[in-house]
Structure formats: C-alpha cells, structure tokens
Image (tube, grey):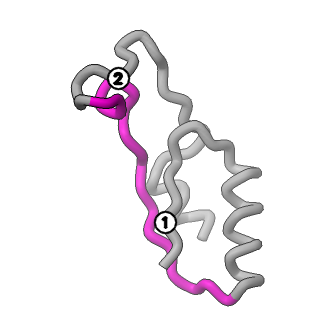
Amino acid sequence: VMQMTCRDRNRIGMQADLLGAAALGIKNCLCLAGDHQIFSGAGRLKGHPGAKNVYDVDTCQLVGIL
C-alpha cells in the first residue's frame, strides 16, 4: 500500500508518483492530508508555529485524481 500526503506537494508531482507506482504494480494508495506545521516538530505542539502549509489539492481531490 502506497501512502500519499497532500501537504507541500503539487498535483503534477503527485500524478508523477502515482504513475510511477502504477508502473511498479502498486494498486493501493492511502490518501492523507499530512500533519500541520505546528504539530509536526519534535516534542509535538512546538514545530514551526509561524510556518504556512502548502496544499495544491486536498485529500478529496487526490482521491479524484486516482
């Protein structure tokens, strides 16, 4: 099962990875949004509170791409 997150990726990169996975015979993909920046640092709840997330597509749109 391939795991794909939407955070900090554009749709072209996601499509390229999905096409590559299909070429390798991977047929299942777990679509996730990804951790928010303030929750993704060491010690949790620290991270980078001033950082902004980048989402070209959300999880529902990623499922539509599949």
Could you tell me which secondary element the residue under label 2 belongs to?
loop
Q: Position of residue 7 (x, y in %)?
A: 51, 41
Q: Position of residue 28 (x, y in %)?
A: 51, 81
In this view, the residue in front, 40 or 5, is 40
Prevailing secondary structure class for the magenta stretch in the rendered image: loop
Q: Amino acid at mark 2?
A: Gly
Q: In the image, which disc is placed on residue 41?
A: none
Residue 27 lies in the magenta stretch: yes
In this view, the residue in front, 39 or 59, is 39
Magenta residues span 25-42
Q: Is residue 65 left or right of residue 38?
A: right
Disc 1: which residue: 3
User: Which numbered disc, 1 or 2, marks the residue closer to the eye?
Assistant: 2
Q: Amino acid at mark 1?
A: Gln
Q: Position of residue 55 (x, y in %)?
A: 54, 36
User: Which numbered disc, 1 or 2, marks the residue that appears first in the sequence?
Assistant: 1
Q: In the image, which disc is placed on residue 47?
A: 2
Q: Residue at x 41, y 10 (%)?
A: 50
Residue 31 lies in the magenta stretch: yes
Mark 1 touches mark 2? (CB < 8 Å): no
Q: Quadrant of the C terminus?
A: bottom right
Q: Position of residue 47 (x, y in %)?
A: 35, 23
Q: Residue at x 62, y 64 (%)?
A: 65
